[in-house]
Amino acid sequence: MTLASKALRQGSLPAAPVPARRRASALARGKALLSALALAGCLALANCDDQESAAAPPPPVALTQEAMGHYCGMALVEHPGPKGQILLRGDERPVWFSSARDTIAFTLLGEEAKSIRAIYVSDMGKAESWEQPGAANWVEARGAFFVLGSNRRGGMGAEEAVPFSDRAAAERFATEHGGAVRSFAEVPPDWVLGDGAAPQAGPEAGPAPSGGAEHRHTH
């Protein structure tokens, strides 16, 4: 009996070395499988994002006594003028704002949230009065018309972007109180952020950028 056959019978024969070519082939197949799994995961996440983006935006939340302004930390009902709320992805609670102008500012600041699903502002064409803008008469800001530079002041005493769902109503307001009518995209960022004067009636302003990075918010 040879040493090899004796070792085989005793179960101590060392395994034959795997050829380098077979090891390389197995390693390549493993890497390909991991790459395929990673790609599938990315496609699944992208598909989820696309489905969420295509889905109808969440409805607005009725204004309550407990709603607190994101920037001022005060109850919204204590202030006159239009209000705003922004609904973010993954959070059913709105981010509240004491003015429509502050609502737009949230979409412009670099440190604020990008994962915006809906932006609502008070439709002042349906408001009971300037002091009582309404709890449920919201309009999606990106489809609204804003009067800039009027003689009415917002919740914090600053110039306001007065929103309307109907352009004719916005123009009537501008005729009575002054200012210029602009769409959401035409509201100048420098005016919103306090660095410029409100545009007057005449040539339309350039589009306002949207975006910003995610930020933890308070309610």
Image (tube, helix red, strand yellow):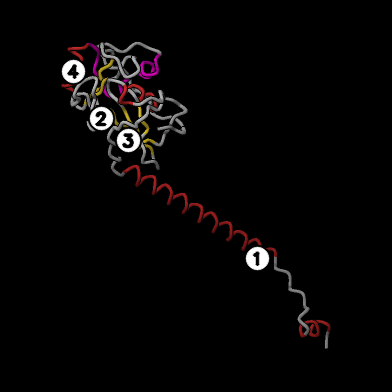
Which residue does the image show at 21% across and 12% down from the upper left? 177
Task: Give the secondary structure at mark 1.
Answer: helix
- The mark found on residue 191 in the picture is none
Which label's residue is closer to the chain start, 2 or 3?
Answer: 3
Instruction: Please tell me whether mark 1 or mark 3 is closer to you in this view.
Output: 3
Which residue does the image show at 47% across and 52% down from the upper left? 41
Q: Quarter of the image containing the C terminus?
A: top left
Q: Which residue is mark 4?
A: 171
| In magenta stretch: residue 74 | no
Instruction: Please tell me whether mark 2 or mark 3 is closer to you in this view.
Output: 3
Task: Give the secondary structure at mark 3.
Answer: strand
Q: Which residues are magenta?
A: 178-194
Tell me the distance, in whole angstroms, between the alpha carbons under discs 2 and 3. Answer: 11 Å
Looking at the rendered structure, the kind of residue marked 2 is Gly
Instruction: Please tell me whether mark 4 or mark 1 is closer to you in this view.
Output: 4
> Image quadrant of residue 78?
top left
Tell me residue 106's x, y (percent).
39, 27
Q: Which residue is mark 3?
A: 118
Tell me the distance, in whole angstroms, between the alpha carbons under discs 1 and 3. Answer: 56 Å
Which label's residue is closer to the chain start, 1 or 3?
Answer: 1
Looking at the rendered structure, the kind of residue marked 4 is Glu
Which label's residue is closer to the chain start, 4 or 1?
Answer: 1
Kindly check if marks 1 and 3 are in contact, taking CB atoms under 8 A apart as contact. no
Tell me residue 154's x, y (percent).
31, 18
Looking at the picture, does residue 64 appear above or below residue 149? below
> Image quadrant of residue 172?
top left
Which label's residue is closer to the chain start, 3 or 4?
Answer: 3
Instruction: Please tell me whether mark 1 or mark 2 is closer to you in this view.
Output: 2
